[in-house]
């Protein structure tokens, strides 16, 4: 379809008030009315003016048109609206412009609305970011949604609304929570659509999540890794006593079955050991490292031929 600049057609700015639009329309209609105008294109201009005013003179249509205008091309140029531009807007009336009617058909064949027509509101989608601990324990969170609507002059504005969301225990990343009746409003008294919130986890350097399995990096001392022993490890479900096998190396994986995300089928928690060396920042520490170097015949590069 070709884009039509209705503001240019009426000779008004995009910030024009409802009264200014009406005044401009009446002035131009009088000028180009076929009964009084001597202009050769009077019929064509009158039709174009009626079309423009049919959209800009209606608050809801103008709000939708203004939102659309952020992605517009030039007058008469090919135009394709983004797929979700018209969420929450309905065509209203049998005298819609050809451009506007084609536009609503293009974005999904929306039916024309009238006072007796009812249609349930469309579903809406958003994302909510939670901590991994929220998935283990459940939580309540407040989120702020930005909702577009038209003001008294028909300009698109946004208002904020706050919703309380219950995060159930065991949710996984990518899962969607349904909030019934919190989507776009219905028309003609029909119920609103639903809001679907996609779960995302807050990035955490200690944890990596794959489905319901959780991977946690656990630092250990050289003697804990070499000699083995029991250590206390903080996990998303609480502190756990873990036995480190002797002669462990960085990267060794310890599996704690069923301690992943506590879904209906819980995942596992994998502890990835990371051997951390004490700093040699005083004489005693350097002496201990020198003793190890003299008395321990150890070459980690032996397999490399070093």
Image (cartoon, grey):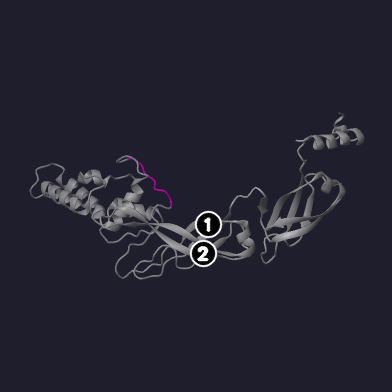
| Residue holding disc 1 | 128
Q: Main secondary structure of the magenta part?
A: loop
| Residue holding disc 2 | 165
| Distance from Cα at disc 1 to Cα at disc 2 | 9 Å
| Range of magenta residues | 77-83
The secondary element bearing badge 2 is classed as: strand
Residue 97 drawn in magenta:
no
From the viewer's perspective, is 147 left or right of 269? left
Asked if the residues shown at circle 1 and circle 2 are in contact, with their CB atoms under 8 angstroms apart, the answer is: yes
Q: Residue at x 25, y 52 (%)?
A: 56
Q: Residues within 10 Å of mark 2 (few under 14, many from 20)?
A: some
Please tell me which residue lies in front, 151 or 106.
151
Looking at the figure, which quarter contains the C terminus?
A: top right
Residue 79 drawn in magenta:
yes
Q: Residue at x 24, y 43 (%)?
A: 8
Q: Where is residue 201, by image quadrant?
A: bottom right
């Amino acid at each position: 379809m070709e884009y039509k600049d209705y503001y240019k057609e009426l000779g008004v700015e995009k910030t024009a008030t409802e009264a200014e639009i009406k005044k401009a329309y009446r002035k131009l209609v009088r000028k180009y009315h076929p009964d009084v105008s001597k202009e050769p294109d009077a019929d064509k201009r009158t039709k174009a003016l009626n079309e423009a005013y049919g959209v800009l003179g209606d608050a809801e249509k103008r709000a939708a048109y203004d939102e659309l205008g952020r992605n517009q091309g030039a007058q008469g140029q090919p135009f394709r609206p983004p797929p979700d531009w018209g969420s929450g807007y309905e065509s209203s009336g049998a005298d819609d412009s050809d451009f506007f009617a084609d536009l609503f058909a293009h974005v999904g064949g929306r039916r024309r609305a009238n006072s007796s027509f009812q249609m349930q509101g469309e579903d809406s989608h958003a994302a909510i970011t939670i901590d991994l601990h929220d998935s283990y324990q459940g939580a309540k969170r407040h989120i702020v949604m930005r909702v577009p609507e038209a003001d008294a002059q028909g300009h698109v504005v946004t208002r904020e609304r706050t919703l309380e969301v219950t995060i159930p225990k065991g949710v996984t990343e990518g899962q969607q929570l349904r909030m019934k009746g919190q989507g776009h409003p219905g028309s003609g008294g029909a119920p609103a659509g639903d809001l679907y919130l996609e779960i995302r986890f807050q990035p955490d350097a200690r944890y990596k999540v794959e489905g319901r399995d959780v991977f946690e990096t656990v630092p250990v001392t050289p003697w804990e890794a070499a000699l083995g022993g029991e250590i206390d490890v903080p996990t998303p479900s609480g502190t756990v006593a873990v036995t480190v096998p002797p002669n462990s190396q960085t990267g060794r994986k310890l599996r704690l079955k069923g301690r992943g995300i506590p879904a209906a089928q819980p995942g596992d928690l994998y502890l990835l050991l990371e051997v951390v060396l004490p700093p040699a920042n005083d004489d005693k520490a350097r002496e201990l490292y020198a003793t190890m170097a003299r008395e321990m015949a150890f070459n980690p590069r032996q397999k490399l031929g070093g």
